[in-house]
Image (cartoon, grey):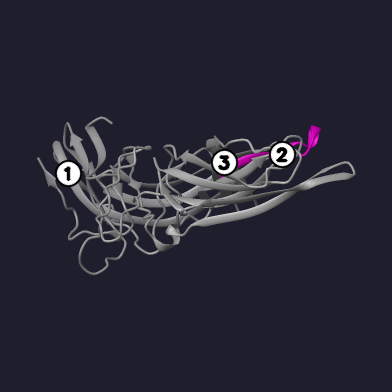
Amino acid sequence: MGKVKKFAIVYDRPVYSSGEWVTGRIVVELTDQIEVTALKMHAKGQEYVRWTERHGSSKHRHTRVYTQKLRYFKHKYWIIGSESEEVTVLQSGRHEYPFSLVLPHVPPLPSSFKDHYGNVSYWMTAKLHRPWKLRAKVKEEFTVFNQIDINSPGLLEPLMATDEKTICCWCCASGPIILNAKIERKGYIVGESIQIVAEIENHSSRTVVPKAAIYKTTVYHAKSKSKTCSESIAEVKGDSILAGQKESRNVMVLKIPQVPPTLMNCTIIQMGYSLKVGVSIPGAMNLTVNLPIVIGTIPLHSFGGPVSDFNTPHLMDYSNVNPALPDGPPVEPGFQVSNRNFGYYT
């Protein structure tokens, strides 16, 4: 960049939550003095989905793109200059311009998320404009992470599901297979084990096997189409149940692997988890029930006791997330500055 040796955005912390102050500084290092018409900052947050599908056949076959974007916020601030394009001279050396951005508090921002078909992203862009020169531009993402407390009343309730299936073979039908599945609560964190109680009545003439699996399901929404991706992230099998065994109680234990927490407050991307408990039946469709679960971040704690610390090792270290918002009255989202052309030079 010629006389511009360094142009960077440096955050004070890598991770933030809704309503918090994103703070840092823009660093400009110069080998010689330069003329500047503007130094601008932009802050954006959005969710975005995109995928393609093939339609038609033979020569009429074509590819259609499905895409959708939802913006949470967009803020701009002039650090140096204005619309009038007055020239400011910056001397050689290192210049630092602190910034403070208040994130929206209500509604809560969804946590950062990224996969093949969509993302939830937050970033800042700085642009340095000089007369008769190509502008210098730098973009730096920051992470938004919102805690999910599994001690919330709705996540402490036990879950249960029941279903039955009768196996037909030509003109004959055997007795039904009845499945009753239970788990102690809806909310868990990574590393915890789910204890699954499967009560099965096998009135059929076949030996069946209980099983359970945790599924991660992501649904992407475009204006006229939705796309669903589902994958098993953990599985377990129970003990076989003989033909005609009227009562059987299987307890299966399934440990939650290192996965992202459930994605909350997201509109065009829904990512969540479910526990599927089933009975594998030879020569027939399996009998399955579905129990929706939430993978959170704050672990279970005893009533009146301290909340346990958390530090999820998946993707990033969340230990820098502030547990509370800044004191004082709510502040309007956007850049918060006391004067123009702030910063210092060394």
The residue pinned by badge 1 equals 96
Image x and y of residue 319, in percent: 26, 44
Q: Is residue 203 visible?
A: yes
Q: Residue furthest bottom?
A: 329
Q: Which of marks 1 and 3 is nearer the N terminus?
A: 1
Please identify the residue farthest to the left as the structure is shown: 346
Can residue 124 be seen by looking at this rendering?
A: no
Q: Where is residue 12 in the image (x, y as percent from the top left)?
A: 22, 45
Start-end of magenta stretch: 50-61
Query: What residue would you read off at disc 3?
Result: 212
> Where does residue 244 sit, x and y in percent of width and height?
72, 42
Per the model, the C-alpha gap separating discs 1 and 2 is: 76 Å
Query: CB under 8 Å between callouts 3 and 2?
Result: no
Residue 57 part of the magenta-drawn span: yes
Query: Which of label 1 and label 2 is nearer to you?
Result: 2
The amino acid type of the residue labelled 1 equals Glu
**Element at label 2:** loop
Residue type marked 2: Ala
